[in-house]
Amino acid sequence: MTFSSGLLLAAASLLCAAQIATAIPHTPNNLARALIKRDQVTFEDCGDDDDKKRKKAGQAWSEAANLASLTMIGKLDDGTEFKTRTRVYPSLILTLATSFKHYFEAADSDTTRKMYSGIQAGSSGDSGNAFQLKFIITCKETIDCKDSLALTDAKPNKDDFIAKIRLCPKFFDENEARTKNLLDSKDLTKNPKRRDNSWCQPGQPFKFFETASHTFLHEMTHLNQLGVEAGLFPDNNGDDGTHGTEDIYQINEPDYDPGSPEKSGRKLKINWVKYNDDNKNKKPELQRIENAESYAAAATEFYFQMHCGWDEIME
C-alpha cells in the first residue's frame, strides 16, 4: 500500500522484460465483474496465464474494479446507497452511508464518484468508454519493495514511460493477512455460525475484511490518469506533475499509523472536522480526497455492509 513517486524507470526496462502479455483479468467470484481483454494494461514478470501470481494479480484488479462499481450501484438492506442525492424542494438532500462518512465529507461527493467511476470504466474494456487506463502490472521484486505490499510509480505516462503498479513478494505471501484473501476466499452467508467460512462473522475489526483487491484499489488511486479524471491537483512532493493520491501516513508518520492505513484515513477526516470547527487546530497535510486509503477503505466497508446487512464496520 505504499506509494512511491520517485521510482524513475528507464524505457529499456519497460521494453525488455522477460514476461509481458496482454491482461485478461477474470475472477470466479460471481459477484465480481469479469473484465474484458485489454490492450492498454499489461502484465510484466508475473508468469504466463496459468501462473499463480498472474491469476492473483488479475483477480485482484478485477475485484478492485468491482468494489469501485458497487459504490455507484449498490444499496444496503435499508435502501441506503453509498451516497444519494434526493430533491426535497427547494433543497437537495445528500444521504451518506457510514462507509462514506468514515472517510469523506459531503463536499467530496463529486470527486469520489469520479474516482470510482474512473476505476470501473477504465478497467472494463468497454470500447465505448472514452476513458481507458494504461499501466503495467509488474510482479518483479526490487529493493524498493522492502516491507511493502505494493508500490505505484504513478508519474504521467509519456512516450518513454508507462506507469507501473508493482506487486511485491509480500502481496503474494499466503501468510500475509492483508493480501492472502480475495473476495471469493470466503462466502457471504449472513448470520453465520462461528465455524462457517463467511465474511459476515459479527464483531470483526476492519482488518478482517482486507483483501488483495483492497490493496490493488488503493494502488490504482495513485495513478496519475485517475487523479486527473477525479480532478485532483498535482501533489507537492516533486515536480513531476502527478495528480494521483498520496498516503497521509507517509507524509506525517508521527501522527498517522502506517500499520493501520484505514485508521489513518478516519483520523484524517476527523482532523479536518476539528480544523474546520476551529482554525487554531492543525491543518491536515492532505485533503481527504487526496488520501489513497480513504477510497479503498470506504469501498471495502460498503461492499461488506451491503452483502452482510450491517449498518457499520468499526475500526
Image (cartoon, grey):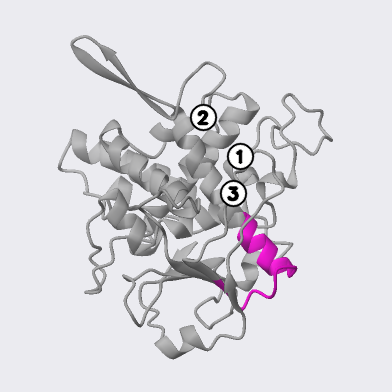
Q: Which residues are magenta?
A: 43-59
- Cβ–Cβ under 8 Å for marks 2 and 3: no
Q: Nearer the viewer, residue 287 or 9?
A: 9
Callout 2: SS: loop
Badge nearest the viewer, 1 or 3: 3
Residue drawn 72% across the image and 26% down it: 190
Q: Residue furthest top?
A: 89
Amino acid at dot 1: Pro
Circle 2 crowding by C-alpha within 10 Å: few under 14, some 14–19, many from 20: some
**Which label belongs to residue 92?**
none
Asked if residue 264 is among those painted magenta in the image, a careful observer would answer no
Residue that mark 1 sits on: 205
Residue drawn 44% across the image and 27% down it: 97
- 143 to the left or right of 238: right
- Disc with the residue nearer the chain's start (2 vs 3): 3
- 151 to the left or right of 290: right
Instruction: Residue 92: name its quadrant.
Output: top left
Whether residue 19 is visible here, answered yes or no, is yes
- 131 to the left or right of 60: left
Amino acid at dot 3: Glu
- Disc with the residue nearer the chain's start (1 vs 3): 3
Circle 3 crowding by C-alpha within 10 Å: few under 14, some 14–19, many from 20: many
Q: Position of residue 220 (x, y in %)?
A: 45, 58
For the residues labelled 2 and 3, the Cα–Cα distance comes to 15 Å
Q: Position of residue 72 (x, y in %)?
A: 44, 34
Residue that mark 3 sits on: 63
- Cβ–Cβ under 8 Å for marks 1 and 2: no
For the residues labelled 1 and 2, the Cα–Cα distance comes to 22 Å
Amino acid at dot 2: Gly
Residue that mark 2 sits on: 74
Q: Is residue 301 above or below residue 86?
A: below
Instruction: Residue 208: name its quadrant.
Output: top right
